[in-house]
Amino acid sequence: EITANCVDALTETNSYNNYVGALAESWEANEEKTEWTFHLRDANWVTNTGEVYAPVTADDFVTTLQHLADFNGSNLWIAASFVEGLSDYVDGNISFDKVGVEAVDDKTVKFTLTAPTPFFNTIVANNAFWPINREFLESKGDGCKLGDPDPANCGYGVATDPSSILYNGAYIIDELVSKSSQKLHKNENYWDAEHVYVNKISRVYNDGSDPA
């Protein structure tokens, strides 16, 4: 609920519940709908202080699937249902370079699927496919190294630490306190910043015990 406002996917739903481009400016599929290619717009990753860290690239979408598999993410089953070879990689049968995701170049990412999927442009909106910057991920501890994961020694994506992720979405987290408050501010370096109209968000936790 929170990070959906902080990290953009390739596509998203608009106010009419239609799927439109987010980080993807355009996309196309082969006739069989087993290969999908997404072309990225210009966008940047920023730190929780708003400093530009790096551009968003196709490798970020390769990284996220390996991270998902290596760290057994809760949504791994979604990606593994569609992306060719991901289940085989999880089972240790193939190396990750045989998985059906490829950075064709910095601005082009290609997915090869297990079966014809004419709606795959909607699937990539799911957080199983949200991008991750490889350099930043592996800087968060020895256990964050892809191919040799050790979750106990990886400080990436710590729920209460806004500095443990990068941001490419509309908002940056200022504070997350369990059962207390959530505070965010507008990302001025967001690719669509002109359409972000609320500058600060502050949510106060309510456990529902007092109906008033």
Image (tube, rainbow, N blue to C red):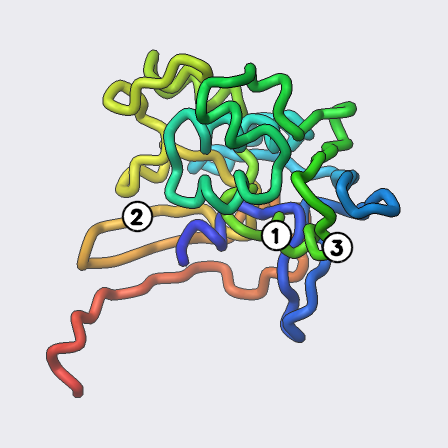
Q: Quadrant location of residue 206?
A: bottom left
Q: CA distance from mark 1 to mark 3?
A: 10 Å
In the displayed structure, does residue 3 sit left or right of residue 27? left
Could you say where residue 156 lies in the image, as x and y percent from the top left? 36, 29
Q: Quadrant location of residue 159?
A: top left
> Label 3 crowding class (10 Å Cα cut-off): few <14, some 14-19, many 20+?
some
**Residue for point 34% across, 62% down:** 202
Name the residue tied to disc 2: 175
Q: Amino acid at mark 1?
A: Ile
Choose the circle earlier in sequence order: 2 or 3: 3
Name the residue tied to disc 3: 118
Name the residue tied to disc 1: 123
Q: Examine the rendered structure and indicate whether residue 69 appears above or below residue 123.
A: above
**Residue for point 68% across, 45% down:** 23
Q: Examine the rendered structure and indicate whether residue 79 appears above or below residue 100.
A: below
**Quadrant showing the N terminus:** bottom left
Q: CA distance from mark 1 to mark 2?
A: 30 Å
Q: Amino acid at mark 2?
A: Glu
The label nearer to you, 1 versus 2, is 1
- Count of marks placed on residues: 3
In the displayed structure, does residue 33 sit left or right of residue 153? right
Could you say where residue 200 lies in the image, as x and y percent from the top left? 43, 59
> Label 2 crowding class (10 Å Cα cut-off): few <14, some 14-19, many 20+?
some
